[in-house]
Amino acid sequence: MPFHSGFAETAMIDWHQSGERMTHRPLPPIANLDRSPYNPVVNTMTQRGPAVISPQMEFKDKYFSLLEKGAKPGRYIGGEPNMVLKDFGPRAGSLRARVS
Amino acid sequence: MQVRFALAFPDVYEIGMSHNGIRMLYHILNRIDDVYAERVFAPWVDMAAVFQSEGVPLLSLETKTPIRDFDLVGFSLQAELTYINIPYMLDLAGIPLLSQDRREGDPLICAGGPCTANPEPLADFIDFFVIGDGEELVVEIVDLCRNARREGLKRWQTLEALAKLPGVYVPQVHQPPTPWVPETRPGKPFTLVKRRWVEALSPDFYSTKPIVPVIDIIQDRVSVEVMRGCTQGCRFCQAGYWYRPTRELNVDDVMRLTSESLKNTGNREIGLLSLSTADYSQVECLTKEMARAFSKDKISISLPSLRADMFSVSLAENVGEVKKNGFTFAPEAGSVRMRRFINKNISNEELFQSIETAYRQGWNLVKLYFMIGLPTETDADIRELVDLIREVGRIGKKVKGGQKNVNASIGTFVPKSFTPFQWDRFEDLKVTTERLNYLKSAVRFPFARLKWHNPMEGFIEGVLSRGDRRVGRAILKAYQLGCRFDAWDEMFNFNLWMKAFEESGLDPHFYNRDIPLNEVLPWEFIDIGVSKKFLLKERERSYEQVQTYDCKWGDCRGCGIPGNYEDIKLAEVPEQVAAESLVQLSLAPFRAADAAKPPEAQRASVPLVQGGQTGSEVSQSSSAEAVNVLTVQPLSVVERAALPARPFVMHYWKEGPARLLSHLNVMQLMERAMIRSEFPLRFTEGFNPHPKFATSPAIPLGMSSHSEYIQFELRGELPENAVARMNACLIEGLVVQNIVPFEAKGQWTITQPLQATYKAWIESEQINGEAGALTELMGRVNDLINHLCDHYKGNDFYCSSKDHERIVDLWVEGDQPPRLGFTVSVNQNGALLKPRDFLEQVLQCPPDLARKFLVVKETVSFQ
């Protein structure tokens, strides 16, 4: 990596040396939280829970079957020339997979 | 340990795919083995509704992975009016909208781009911001996240580690800046984050194999960033201060990147990107070299808007070698006084001379960008703007005749952070609307077309660009009320936004007012390098009508970023060019002879000759043949042009995802694949050259076909393995079957089919609830087959449809589910019966059922 400056490692070392990880410190509250600015009923997709289709391959098939229902479906197909494809496997190594 | 990074753009594919930053980050990240960057754009509202109703979350374009399964999601913030699409996309992805609600399994949401010049309005949505250039920082972020995972760190621990990276702002970790609440001011500003910038532009940042879009995008060209940063010092321009210092790519690097990208994309247009490309120190040399290397292949060069005082005859000649669409100048204000106020020091004479040069060099259209609502603007300034447009039109009429030759675009000034005008108000909506209405009524010249932006959009943009953290409430409320895609005129809803402010308990006018100079600003915790003292000084100079000259040539103006070439990285002067003194803006003459003079005197020292051409340009023109600076291998197009044109026909299939592309999009993909496959295509002559193609008639969107044809002409031989080469350059579903010579030169036969055979069927899972209707339909099919058999035996033929004469054959294959086969012929006008019409009109299939049929065109016969 020709432009890697190593800041990431430095930051990690600083953080390790600080010893902060030993005690969980809650994140500071966001500003103006006391004014209750947010309507809690906003995460519509989240509150519906996981989507009804679980395996990823079905998502893909379902996704393509829906594209004809919208305008300019070419926007959504992907697979363009020079697109990068890497075989990471379904959800391989993702945070979500690790947690679940 | 793998890291998956979703590069998110809060607008549609056509806009996002045109953005150079996404392309660069995509390339930089995917170069790392264990990192996979994928793209995601905001789906238009119709498609989003379909996804939501069907329970399909927002997916990446590459692997169709749900966005919520990524480790990092990075939004590119290019314009404030796209902010609304951040909660929209997060919601579609099923990711909690607010940082505080996200938990361990959720991705880290980050954002970068010029709008991070004031990140506070989005602070509650975004986990961390990348402040400044991302090329190096994004790699550090990915490394850190990988290490954090290896260490098993919690989400909050990772965010705290990120907060220690220079250039990263984590709203939940960094102490939030003093809220912009009146009773807390004046306060003491403090720095939390320093903007990061790369010391020099490296060719390694740029991909020479960018993704080739499958549909029309707004900037569909090979884009090369020749320069980053601009020190002209226009006082309204946030980018001019944000992207300092000036860094340029060398000419040979630009040429190499361009030629490789052209070869790898098949594109026929080059865009030289920067904030002010005419200020690129080697612009004359570069455009001349590009014209020499690429114009023979009908590859055109386009430039973004230009400063009129940097425009020259030779630049126009180089850029307009192949195509002359339109030239764009940005005087920004109509009166000289206003231009002096904003430090855009262009006289009317310079502007008119440049425009006349453009017209005389063959351009038919000049585009002019203006702003209204600038500080101190009066009605007299607006009247001068009308006079200026009238005069430009008069020049155009004199040179080009009576056609429409001027497009004037009117925007509304929006004060932005980190500019000398950051304390000034957004002009009252009533005033801007009145001035815009005056312009609409006054600019009614037959040669001019006026375009404008809605000042109400500017009002909201003003709130978002100078807002504090509380504005996030209004963004969320506006999203809940239904705002989407605010940057699109047809989607923008001012009333909903005002309702959102009201329900959030915010007064939008508070953010668009004149701000006292001693107030602590919401964005002051960022140190961008340019000092507040300098901005205040510039503000004073604007009111005093004092010009601040460009520091690019070594005369430091004390903005805070070191001058005197400590940070400015100009392109190297190519050796032969320097020796022949061919570069107008090369460093040497300015430093050696004119260093002591102000830039105005420097410009004056280059004598002007006829048509605005400078002395150095004359020598450049006269020595054009001698210039051979770079070793770009010229293609043998000139030799090819002498060869006779030979016609060929290509047979291809269109199915799978490709069936969702329009006919024109497929043609564009085919053209680019042919160029990439080194087909010696014959081009049309004239104003806008394009390959000479003929195609079989377009099929409806969504229909597959095994019988599509393109007829084209080559000047030379078909390359070896042409079919394999083509298929390597196409997308899934577009498959070239064969390419054969076509002997009947001059006859474009494939455009006139005689009859076509289709097959149609319904997938088993789609039949639900329609089994009865399908059975009835098959009964009618059997009846019609019997009638046709009678007809073939010479008996009378009964059919309820007037199209019966166009039915050549009809049959059924299989039964689970049955497949219909039918052959239809053209009518007396040469039009084929459409398969959907056959189903609905001939077979009387209900439209809902007909829509479920998958149709493939199997064969077609021609005259």
Image (spheres, grey):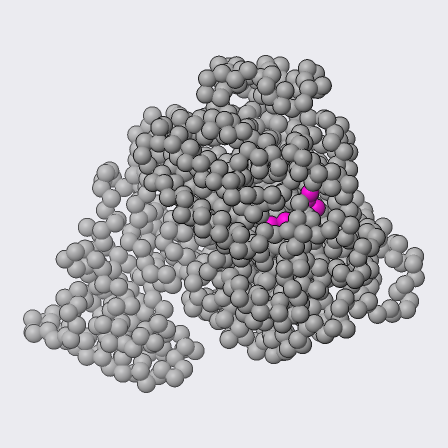
Question: Where's residue B218, x and y in %?
Answer: 48, 48
Q: Is residue B698 above or below residue B595?
A: below
Q: Is residue B565 above or below residue B60?
A: above
* Left or right, residue B382 beside residue B535: left
Q: Nearer the viewer, residue A1 or B400?
A: B400
Residue drawn at 49 percent across, 21 percent down? B612
Residue drawn at 68 percent across, 26 percent down? B553
Magenta stretch secondary structure, dominant:
loop
Residue drawn at 72 percent across, 26 percent down? B554
Q: Is residue B418 magenta?
A: yes
Image quarter of the N terminus of chain B? bottom right
Image mark count: 0
Q: Nearer the viewer, residue A58 or B177?
A: B177
Question: Where's residue A4, x and y in %?
Answer: 76, 44
Region in magenta: B414-420
Question: Where's residue B473, x and y in %?
Answer: 67, 67
Residue drawn at 30 percent across, 30 percent down? B644
* Left or right, residue B527 beside residue B641: right
